[in-house]
Amino acid sequence: MYTLRATGLCLRPFGARDVAAFAAAARESAESVGRWMPWCHAEYSEQEARDWFGVCQQHLADETAFEFGIFAEQGGELLGGAGLNTLNRQHNLCNLGYWVRQSRQRQRVATRCVRLLSAFGFETLRLTRIEIVAAQGNQASQGVARAAGAQFEGVARNRLVIRGEPVAAAVFSLIPTER
């Protein structure tokens, strides 16, 4: 099991003890996070959290994705989630995604997570490229990518599907030599 630490943060896989806190954080964040990530909605249930944790555990066992809960190092409050997913071993790259609960946004939590997860991706998983893809209009996520040192590469048309509709997205990348 992987546990990653950075100043004030602990990233670790979700466990059964996190179900209620995850569901509460998702419900709290429906307005801000839910705008870009439709899974995050005002009625998010503990069963949905359990189902997600099961998917995360299977992906971790298969080493096809590495999803983590973001927790405060002191006190263990659940701050959000972040992970490396959509791993492409042939081309040695993946996607890096993140979300932070509404009450803890704008505290550089996501930026610290991007730096921590990219180091894990490059040093432990030996990846050579990590992408961050943020819907056009999602200025907060794009700002995180920039603050973490990711290179803006362009806008890809119809790159994401949100609520059944294709949307353009800004594509950022990190590579090991630029960290």
Image (tube, helix red, strand yellow):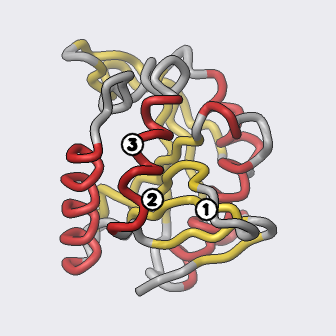
Identify which residue is drawn at 33% across, 67% down. 16
Label 2 sits on a secondary structure element that is strand
Q: Position of residue 36 (x, y in %)?
A: 43, 23
Q: Is residue 100 above or below residue 75?
A: above
Quarter-wise, where is residue 143 in the image? Answer: top right
Can you give x and y, in whole percent of width and height, for residue 118 in the image? 59, 66
Report which residue position mark 2 lands on. 83
Q: Is 141 situated above or below 179?
A: above
Among the two numbered marks 2 and 3 on one chain, the one whose residue lies closer to the N terminus:
3
Residue 112, disc: none
Dot 1: what SS? strand
Query: According to the image, label 3 marks what residue?
Result: 23
Query: In the structure shown, which secondary structural element does the residue marked by tag 3 occupy?
Result: helix
Q: Nearer the viewer, residue 45 or 62?
A: 45
Mark 3 closeness class: few <14, some 14–19, many ≥20 residues within 10 Å: many
Q: Nearer the viewer, residue 165 or 70?
A: 70
Q: Position of residue 41 (x, y in %)?
A: 36, 24
Residue 157 location, x and y as percent? 36, 19
The residue labelled by disc 1 is 71
> Picture quarter containing residue 74?
bottom right
How far is mark 1 from mark 3, CA to CA? 14 Å
Q: Quadrant of residue 117?
A: bottom right
Looking at marks 1 and 2 on the same chain, the residue that comes earlier in the sequence is marked by 1
